[in-house]
Image (cartoon, rainbow, N blue to C red):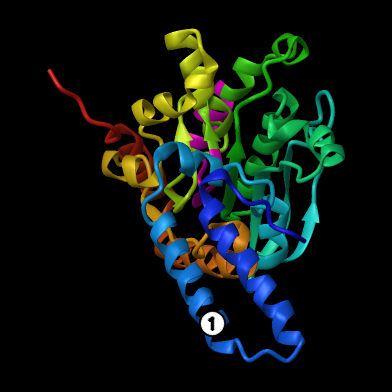
Amino acid sequence: MAVQNLEFEKPIVELEKKIEELNLLARDGLDIGADVATLEKRVEEMRNEIFSNLSRWQTAQVARHLHRPFTLDYIKLIFTDFTELHGDRVFGDDHAIVGGLARLDDQPVMVIGHQKGSDTKEKVYRNFGMPNPEGYRKALRLMKMAEQFKLPVITFVDTPGAYPGIGAEERGQAEAIARNLRDMASLATPVVVCVTGEGGSGGALAIAVGNRILMLEHSIYSVISPEGCAAILWSDGSKGAQAADALKLTAQDIISLGVIDEIIKEPVGGAHRNHEEMAKNLKEAIVRNLSELSSLSDDQLLEDRYKKFRAMSQFVE
């Protein structure tokens, strides 16, 4: 599968085209191996330089990349024996949130996450990763099941936000999100949250109240999308880059506020460049954090979660 290149990667793409041209000449017997090696080294250096100095808006573009791993990709690469569970037992099954039982090595766990699509058909089927109320109610049903059987809960956050359609509002979108926030705060089982792409507003937070919150290096987490923020502040959604700077939505920005606990390093060029390496890095962090939480009693888990969210942010008088 060809990887979609982003606008700021153009200098790298141009060099890669030159390498392809030289490789074609090499097939004709020309000895240009040294030239190719030099260019390949330069491409690696440029990619390291560009991705170590991304602007907030560029980070948002990487977080939204079409080929970035989604929840089902991580489930396939990190867990075994996954059995998907469907429906909220009230209205229906929301395809924008997936979840079910799985094993993390030998440990049974409950895995839940937003699911986007990488092509038009799947995007429509998954509603572009924007859940309806039944999605959040399904997620909470699975969390309550995990609590009943003393299973750790692992969530993957990747959504532009909850679906704002009329039907969603009629079926109680705000109530479903609020209930998840309340009930997740009191789950008597370890909860590890992984922000893997976009962490958009209440649509993300509804499955992100956990004891540990991990965030991928080039993901974003904010109260609103940059475009939505720009539309409200300046009546111009095209000023997303300016809004991204104001929102301070990158992992590097918000770890100092205590909103997240750990930044997970991505492969050079972003998680979409190497799904296997990204999954390996994320699994190591999940296993380590679950191991630390396993020694806590139910009361200690609740106290740990309470103190975590009470201590978030900074205030200036």
Q: Disc 1 marks which residue?
A: 35
Place of residue 5 in the rendered image (x, y in percent of width and height, measured from the top left): 63, 51
Which span is picked out in magenta?
A: 178-198
Q: Is residue 290 left or right of residue 100?
A: left
Residue found at x 47% / y 42%: 58
Q: Nearer the viewer, residue 101 or 3?
A: 3
Looking at the image, the residue that sits furthest to the right is: 121
Place of residue 79 in the rendered image (x, y in percent of width and height, measured from the top left): 68, 65
Residue found at x 47% / y 50%: 218
Q: Quadrant of the C terminus?
A: top left
Q: Nearer the viewer, residue 294 or 60?
A: 60
**Residue 170, placed above or below residue 53:** above
Q: At label 1, which amino acid type do we have?
A: Asp
Q: Is residue 16 magenta?
A: no
Quarter assignment of residue 278: bottom right
Q: Nearer the viewer, residue 105 or 265?
A: 265
**Residue 45, placed above or below residue 213:** below
Residue found at x 50% / y 39%: 60
Q: Is residue 186 magenta?
A: yes
Q: Is residue 274 visible?
A: no
**Residue 179, placed above or below residue 81:** above
Q: Is residue 238 left or right of residue 18?
A: left
Looking at the image, the residue that sits furthest to the left is: 317
Q: Which secondary structure, mark 1?
A: helix
